[in-house]
Image (cartoon, grey):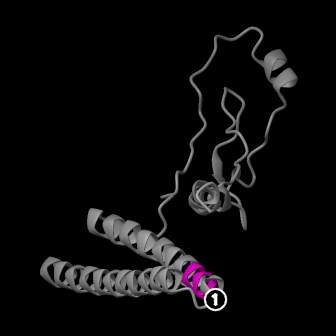
Amino acid sequence: MKKLTPFLVTLSLSLPLLAMAQSNPPLQSGAGAAPLQPGPGSTGLQAAPGTPTVPPNQQQQQNAGTPPAAPSAQAHLDNPLNGVNSISDLFYKIANFIVSLSYVVIAFFLILSGFKFVKARGNETELEKAKATFKYTIIGAFLIVGAQTIIAIVKNIIDQLQK
């Protein structure tokens, strides 16, 4: 079990990062590049409608006798933190993420304590260890729920003070 715990902790912390990973197409730039705007239904940037795009080889032929111009590409950057417009919102989102992650840990330890009860088979010392694991898991769960309640109350107070 001691060898399995670091693996489970690493796995539980890396899964959200893998789930949030996304790839965006590279931005166009240069003299003949079209202004970039978000495309419909995509997270990447696309050329503005009605703007001609020039392939790189034709662009070099067009610009052979003229001095290089400044890049005319305009990019619109969206806020990557959806719904976060202030520091208090950011802290609230981080706290909610940590609380959500702790629910997974609580479920793991509840299952672990159940396995310990089954494994004890009437052995008093093993049964006491299983009871202690269950007791501390329930105490931790109450602390997490209490912390989430306090976070929600503080956020409501801050929101009311800002209005």
Q: Visible in this render: residue 85?
A: no
Res 159 seen here: yes
Which residue is located at x 12 percent, y 80 percent?
Answer: 161
Q: Which residue occupies 24% across, 83% down?
A: 150
- Give the structural element (helix, strand or loop) at label 1: loop
What quarter of the picture does the N terminus occupy?
bottom right
Q: Nearer the viewer, residue 135 or 96?
A: 135
Q: Quadrant of residue 108?
A: bottom right
Q: Residue 11, position in %: x, y? A: 64, 59
The magenta-colored residue range is 112-117
Is residue 39 depicted above or below 33 in this figure? below
Question: Residue 21's quadrant in the figure?
Answer: bottom right
In the rendered image, residue 154, in percent from the top left (x then y), is placed at: 20, 80
Closest to the observer, 80 or 68: 80
Q: Position of residue 70 (x, y in %)?
A: 56, 23
Categorize mark 1 by other alpha carbons within 10 Å: few (<14), some (14-19), many (20+): few
Q: Is residue 113 magenta?
A: yes
Q: Is residue 57 above or below residue 35?
A: above
Quadrant of the snapshot with the C terminus: bottom left
Q: Is residue 67 magenta?
A: no
Q: Which residue is mark 1?
A: 121
